[in-house]
Image (cartoon, rainbow, N blue to C red):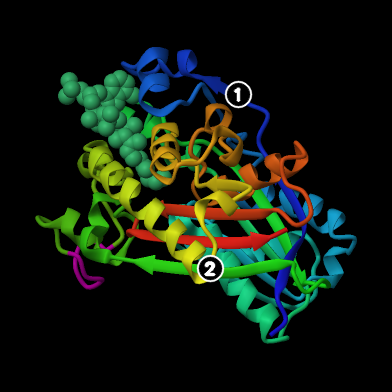
Amino acid sequence: MQRSKIAGIGHYVPKNVYTNKDLSRFMDTNDEWIQERTGIKERRFADRLEETTTTMGVEAAKIAIDRAGITAQDIDFIIFATLSPDYYFPGCGVLLQREMKMKEIGALDIRNQCSGFVYALSVADQFVKTGMYKNILVVGSEKHSFAMDFETRSRNVSVIFGDGAGAVVLQPAQKDHQGILSTHLHSDGAEAEILAMFYPGAHANKWLKDKPAYPDQELGGLFLTTEQLESGAALPYMDGPAVFKKAVVKFPEVIREALAANSLSEKDIDLLVPHQANLRISQYVQQLLGLSDEQVFNNIQKYGNTTAASVPIALCEAWEAGKIKDGDLVCLAAFGSGFTWASALIRW
Ligand code: UT7
């Protein structure tokens, strides 16, 4: 079966830099805590009015399309991964199609949070393998800053996340040895609520226990009272230590699964590009797999955790820095809310 390859890659990060010290002006936190627990030094926040998840995705896509040597008109399918869409619906895929004046092609949105890009890549890979599409644009983009709470009550979440976008163009591979070797997708919803944003959502009625929730009554299901909003009902929730513990098990597991599926081992990896969740998670995974510093790429120090954008941004920076050469074995791996986790093994 025809393999798919990454023919072009691009990324975009907003120009507004917020250091840890900047955040400590708004909430009770400090540079030492953030660096020690997460490795993050600074992150980017999008312009509140001018930039959206879609516009950042468009900027990354333009670079990826240009590097693939094609035009936006050549793209025959869009897959857009994000947890911070411009609208509750429709998704960012169609907004990108409009913005880039693409043909009336299919546009699919992926809601898999931190592993969204690897999931999206896997879906695109299947379409290329079957011969259905030849130029698929895969985007991961996040504007976390729009929903972040900069008060001390949310400091465990707000210091971690940042904004940005990455994109790739997937095409049929020309050389036999090249391309995506395999992808591996997993989920376990048993602990779906330990990293979640509950509102707006059909289950948001749980926040409305003392209020009627049907249209013929006083309030619709998507409305919160001022008191509920102020109490943080509409903010992202994360049990950080629980997520950490699961991540350090599932990252190595899904990486080893990819290696075993291709009769390869840890020493064959030229570059592991893990989702940038927390530098401590990456370092732990590196140690567990016995990988050298040269075999693992991290850039969370500069951007924080950009969820669905983190893998393509890191992959793009690694490629731009000359850390990925033709024939290299590149492993992508991600873990996050859901829980969902995934890996992809690519012969560059
Ligand atoms: O992208 C995938 C999804 N997310 C993740 O993978 C995140 C995984 N989890 C983590 O990265 C870590 O759990 C965090 C970085 C979120 C938190 O680090 P931790 O070492 O697990 O800290 P903790 O939540 O156990 O909190 C330790 C202390 C607490 O104080 P007390 O109760 O010991 O007095 C927190 O209140 O640190 C406090 N704390 C902070 N202090 C200063 C929590 N956030 C902050 C902060 N600044 N920003």
Q: Is residue 178 left or right of residue 32?
A: right
Disc 2 is placed on an element classified as: loop
Say which of marks 1 and 2 sits in front. 2
Look at mark 2 in the image and give the residue it sits on: 263
Which stretch appears magenta?
213-221
Q: Nearer the viewer, residue 293 or 61?
A: 293
Residue 247 image offset from top left, x and y in percent: 34, 48
Residue 142 in sight: no
**Disc 1 marks which amino acid?**
Val
Q: Is residue 287 left or right of residue 61?
A: left
Q: Quadrant of residue 153?
A: top left
Q: Which quadrant: the N terminus?
A: bottom right
Residue at horizontal 33 percent and vertical 59 percent from the top: 338
**Disc 2 marks which amino acid?**
Ser
- Residue placed farthest to the left in the image? 210
Look at mark 1 in the image and give the residue it sits on: 17
Q: Is residue 153 left or right of residue 317?
A: left
Distance CA(mark 1)–CA(mark 2) = 43 Å
Ligand 1, image quadrant it occupies: top left
Structural crowding at the residue carrying mark 2, measured as other residues with C-alpha within 10 Å and reported as few (<14), some (14–19) or many (≥20): few
Q: Which quadrant: the C terminus?
A: bottom right
In this rendering, is residue 31 above or below 107? above
In this rendering, is residue 155 above or below 307? above
Question: Do callouts 1 and 2 mark residues in contact (Cβ within 8 Å)?
Answer: no
Residue 242 image offset from top left, x and y in percent: 23, 44
